[in-house]
Structures are given as structure tokens and as C-alpha cells.
Image: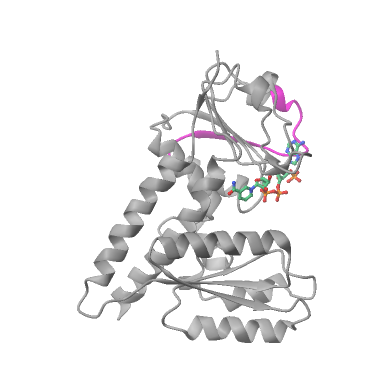
Amino acid sequence: MSAELLKGKPVADAIADEIRSSIARLASLPVPITPGLATVRLGSRSDDIAYERNIIKRAESLGLRAKNLSLPETASQDELLSAISDLARDDSVHGILPFRPMPPHIKGGALKQAIPPEKDIDCIGAPSSASVYDRSLPGFLPCTAEAVIELLRFRKIPLEGANVVVLGRSMVVGRALALLLLDENCTVTVCHSKTRGIEAISSKADILICAMGRARKVTAPYIKTGAAVIDVGINDDGNGGICGDADYESVSQIAGTITPVPGGIGTITNTILIRHAVNACIAAKRKD
Ligand code: NAP
């Protein structure tokens, strides 16, 4: 048996259609408005530049206005905060995405406070984080965690009462997902690097979320027969490419469904980020 592939593209395409409709509605208003997104990069890390290129291309192809602010790696924290504060005041920018990690001389707390919650499309600040715990609060969810929920819903994988094991407890992925899955009425177990007997726990999961950042660590003994395996990991495969946390060859023999890496959750994440910018624009318009 080989597991069915849960590709990210159909999910991303459906979200993109939703984005295009929202943009068309905003363009047909008596005073038309185009959603705008700004990326903020300090330095020239190649993965930041690749991410920036990707986001800007995708945003523009969907009809947003995108701009990128790049500062030298030596720019001071004050220079960075002043540039972000300009974007915060700019009515044509609805979402701000700073690439992290920032160089060590930039204090994470300062960055978190600089981005106004209504433009915090990547869930960096405290108000957005609070909204993960209490969905009645305003704020944008962490994009990757939201991407996983979108995929599970899109593929109609039963969630209510499902036993879900999340491998990883980072604030932006594992922990956020655990809370979002609770909201979907799943029974959630979170494992981390100090968990004993992970295989015995994960092999009871109807849905296994792999978010450890450990290349091909999850093998057949981790998997319940027929389980849905959602692989969030993006790891260097040692051959110039990327691979997930799941060892695809062995896991796909046991699982019922599995997301590929690349081509799975990562494909959805960027589109979610862009949807956040569009929704931020809609919310700003409502406030006028
Ligand atoms: P992270 O902050 O490094 O957190 C990793 C988590 O995995 C930690 O909670 C850690 O436990 C746990 N862990 C590490 N090794 C483990 C092991 N051997 N057994 C059990 N638990 C283990 O990473 P992250 O930011 O959450 O990202 C996780 C992965 O998702 C990475 O590969 C990252 O590149 C990828 N990612 C993908 C997307 C996407 O769009 N697809 C977006 C963001 C991140 P402790 O807490 O005990 O240290």
C-alpha cells in the first residue's frame, strides 16, 4: 500500500481564488483600494532573499501591491524601527512581514512592538499571539499552523474526536497548532525533545503532525496504519534539496495519506500570508 498524497497546491489555489474575489470587490468600491504588503529585510541572507522574491511575486500575481524594504545588516535597531514605523503609518501598506531571525543586535521585543497588531500578518506581536489562545480576540494566526488546518479541512479529514499527535512545541508551529486543533474538537497530545517513548504515542495518532525540523526522523514505527501524516518540516536533504521530518519511503507504506515535502504545507503557507494582508486591508476599510 502507498499513502495518498495530500498536495498543497489545490488548497493554495482555492485560497488564491478567494483572494482574487476579495481584491475584485475592493477594486469595485466607489473609492477603489488595492491591498498592500511590505517585506522588511535586514542584511542579505540568501534564504530571506528567496522568501522575499517568492512572496512579492505571489502577492503581485494575485493583484496586491508589494514593496520590499531592505536595510544593510549593519543598520541600527533605531533605523529599523523608524523604517517600520513609516510602514505602520503608510495607508497603502496593510501587512508588514519582517524576515527573521534578525541579526543579534536587533531585540526581538522591540520588533514585536513596532508592528501594529492590525498589520501583523505573520503573528509576531503579543496581541496576535493572544488570538491563538482566544479566537474571539482580533489577530492573524501563525501562517503555517493555519495552513495545516486549511489542508485538513479542505481534504475533509475528520477532526472531531480525532486523536492528533503534534511532534514539536514551538510557539509558531507545534504549540499554536495544538490550540487550533483543540478548537476543532480533536484530542491533542504534544511531544517534544524530552518526551519519552514518542513512537508508542505517535503510533496511536489518527493524525500525526510532524514539526520538529529533524530530517526523515519519523519512520514506520511512528505511524498508525491508515493515519494522516502532515509533514511541516523543511530540512536540508544533504543533496541540495529539501525534505520533511517524515521518511517518506517508509511512512507512505503505512499511512493512509501524507503531505509531500516540497509541495505540501509550505505551498499553502505563503498564500495564507497574502490572505492575511488582504483581510487586513478589508478590516482597515471597514474602520474608515
Ligand atoms: P523549532 O522552533 O526548532 O521547534 C522544533 C520543535 O521540535 C521543538 O519543540 C523541539 O522540542 C521539537 N523536537 C526537536 N527534535 C525533536 C525530537 N528528536 N523529538 C521530539 N521533538 C523534537 O522549529 P519550528 O520553527 O517549529 O519548525 C519546525 C519545522 O517546521 C522546521 O523544519 C521548519 O523549517 C519547518 N517550518 C515549516 C514551515 C512551512 O511553511 N512548511 C513554516 C515554519 C517552519 P523542544 O521544545 O524540547 O526543543
Q: Is residue 149 above or below residue 3?
A: below
- Provide residue 60's location: percent of width, then percent of height: 44, 65
Viewport quadrant of the N terminus: top right
Q: Residue at x 54, y 31 (%)?
A: 164
Q: Is residue 218 visible?
A: yes
- Provide residue 48's location: percent of width, then percent of height: 67, 63
* Left or right: 270, with 111 as reference point: left
| Residue 198 highlighted magenta (yes or no) | yes
Mark count: 0
- Provide residue 14's location: percent of width, then percent of height: 36, 46
Question: Magenta residues, as a range?
Answer: 184-199
- Provide residue 42's location: percent of width, then percent of height: 70, 74
**Nearest to the observer: residue 58 or residue 266:** 58
| Residue 213 highlighted magenta (yes or no) | no
Viewport quadrant of the C terminus: bottom left
Q: Is residue 283 above or below residue 19?
A: below
Residue 169 falls in image quadrant: top right
> Where in the image, quadrant-wise, is ligand 1 located?
top right
Kindly give the residue lying farthest to the top in the view shown.
1
Q: Residue at x 62, y 87 (%)?
A: 82
Q: Residue at x 39, y 47 (%)?
A: 13
Residue 235 falls in image quadrant: top right
* Left or right: 47, with 24 as reference point: right
Q: Is residue 100 above or below residue 269?
A: below
Q: Is residue 140 visible?
A: no
* Left or right: 278, with 45 as reference point: left
